[in-house]
Image: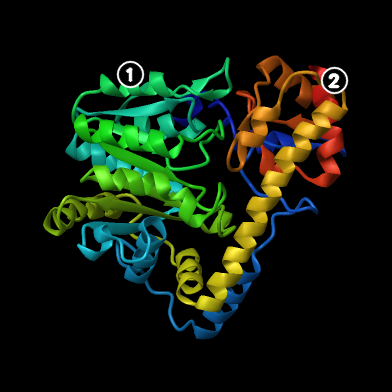
């Protein structure tokens, strides 16, 4: 069997990191994978995380399995983070949360759940979207379709195209939305657009699926949840797939959650009982450590305050890198208008660089960017900024 297999193509993002590691250029820069870098070019362990881990180590008495859906305390904290303290969805017991191996695990659990219980439904994805979205759902047998999202001419949201496409979707179809910090464009709907979008989803009986990977990286924890909270106000049912890799810096701990919201507590209980067999036949139960770290930080007022301060510092630094990047390009003689980059949110920017320019950056300068032109702004530093801007000016 193995002898007959052909070489599979490399992952467009993680495969890029493998190539980067082999790059001999001493000034090489990796702006592909979505990992935050500090001023020194490192990906630090947050101080709040280090303290939480120290306490957990002191308190640890067992390594026994978690329940299928993970620790209930973790789920409760995640619901508060998503919907806010005392939200009616939480008070009425309409939400159920499963701790999953990262946000990708949450997406795969959702994909399997949808395919088992709504096999005729499509999943609508933004054009463009995160490279792995289509693969995760297609791998579970879910049919996917695209709705317009990015207007390349104006470097802005194609909201009218988005509404028109979703207005033609069939009732029962699912729609994947990026709750904030859209990956790869960095462009998010405005509050009034979220209202129109949520009303359309409810009117058309479409199931919202919100991918929430960057809470706190756009404008703040509460501000970044505004779109989700607008949708939940209009739509009786939805699913949230959230990740804590970025905002807690827990990349290799794989901490995520799949949160299901139903119209009633009874419906939520029935629906979630059908999520558990999906988990059981996939990875059985989730890893404990990362979720324990998140729970402890959110449960302890001092640790939470420290974490929120560190999250604010990361967000502020990314904003500063956007501004320095635009200013640096102008300083190096680039006369194309890149000011749109300062208006985008989160870690990523849809830069507008073409595939030929991306390839030239890699070949001539050892600068690695995803083929679509998506740049990880959080990978920029004061140390590599001048070299980066000089290189982009050269390929343009």
Q: Is residue 66 visible?
A: yes
Q: What is the spatial separation of the Cα atoms under label 2 and label 1, in whole angstroms?
A: 40 Å
Residue where numbered disc 2 is placed:
394
Q: Position of residue 154 (x, y in %)?
A: 57, 18
Q: Secondary structure at mark 1?
A: helix
In the image: residue 146, left or right of residue 23:
left
Quarter occupied by residue 148? top left
Q: Could you tell me which quadrant the C terminus lies in?
A: top right
**Residue that appears at 55% across and 81% down:** 55
| 258 lies above or below 345 | below
Label located before the other in sequence (2 or 1): 1
Nearer the camera: disc 2 or disc 1: 1
In the image: residue 375, left or right of residue 208:
right
Q: Position of residue 119 (x, y in %)?
A: 20, 31
**Display colour scheme:** rainbow
**Residue that appears at 39% across and 55% down:** 257
Q: Position of residue 339 (x, y in %)?
A: 69, 29
Residue 359, numbered label: none
Residue where numbered disc 1 is placed:
164
């Amino acid at each position: 069997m193995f002898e007959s297999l052909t070489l599979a193509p490399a992952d467009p993002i993680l495969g890029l990191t493998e190539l980067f590691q082999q790059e001999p250029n001493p000034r090489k820069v990796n702006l592909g994978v979505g990992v935050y870098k500090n001023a020194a070019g490192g990906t630090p362990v947050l101080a709040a995380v280090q303290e939480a881990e120290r306490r957990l180590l002191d308190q640890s008495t067992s390594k026994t399995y978690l329940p299928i859906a993970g620790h209930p305390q973790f789920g409760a904290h995640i619901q508060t983070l998503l919907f806010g303290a005392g939200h009616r969805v939480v008070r009425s017991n309409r939400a159920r949360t499963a701790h999953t191996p990262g946000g990708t695990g949450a997406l795969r659990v959702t994909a399997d759940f949808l395919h088992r219980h709504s096999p005729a439904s499509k999943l609508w994805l933004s054009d463009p979207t995160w490279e792995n979205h289509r693969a995760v759902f297609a791998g579970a047998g879910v049919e996917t379709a695209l709705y317009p999202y990015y207007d390349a001419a104006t470097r802005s949201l194609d909201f009218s195209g988005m509404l028109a496409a979703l207005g033609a979707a069939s009732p029962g179809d699912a729609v994947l939305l990026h709750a904030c910090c859209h990956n790869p464009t960095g462009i998010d709907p405005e509050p009034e657009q979220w209202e129109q979008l949520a009303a359309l989803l409810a009117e058309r009986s479409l199931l919202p699926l919100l991918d929430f990977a960057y809470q706190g990286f756009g404008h703040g924890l509460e501000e970044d949840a505004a779109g989700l909270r607008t949708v939940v106000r209009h739509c009786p049912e939805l699913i949230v797939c959230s990740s804590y890799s970025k905002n807690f810096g827990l990349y290799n701990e794989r901490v995520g959650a799949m949160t299901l919201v139903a119209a009633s507590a009874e419906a939520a209980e029935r629906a979630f009982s059908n999520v558990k067999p999906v988990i059981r036949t996939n990875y059985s139960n989730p890893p404990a450590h990362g979720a324990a770290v998140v729970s402890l930080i959110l449960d302890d007022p001092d640790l939470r305050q420290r974490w929120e301060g560190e999250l604010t510092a990361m967000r502020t630094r990314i904003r500063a890198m956007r501004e320095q990047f635009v200013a640096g390009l102008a300083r190096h003689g680039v006369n194309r208008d890149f000011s749109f980059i300062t208006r985008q949110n989160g870690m990523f920017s849809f830069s507008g660089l073409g595939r030929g320019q991306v390839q030239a950056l890699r070949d001539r300068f050892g600068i690695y960017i995803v083929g679509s032109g998506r740049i990880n702004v959080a990978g920029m530093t004061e140390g590599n900024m001048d070299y980066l801007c000089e290189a982009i000016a050269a390929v343009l």
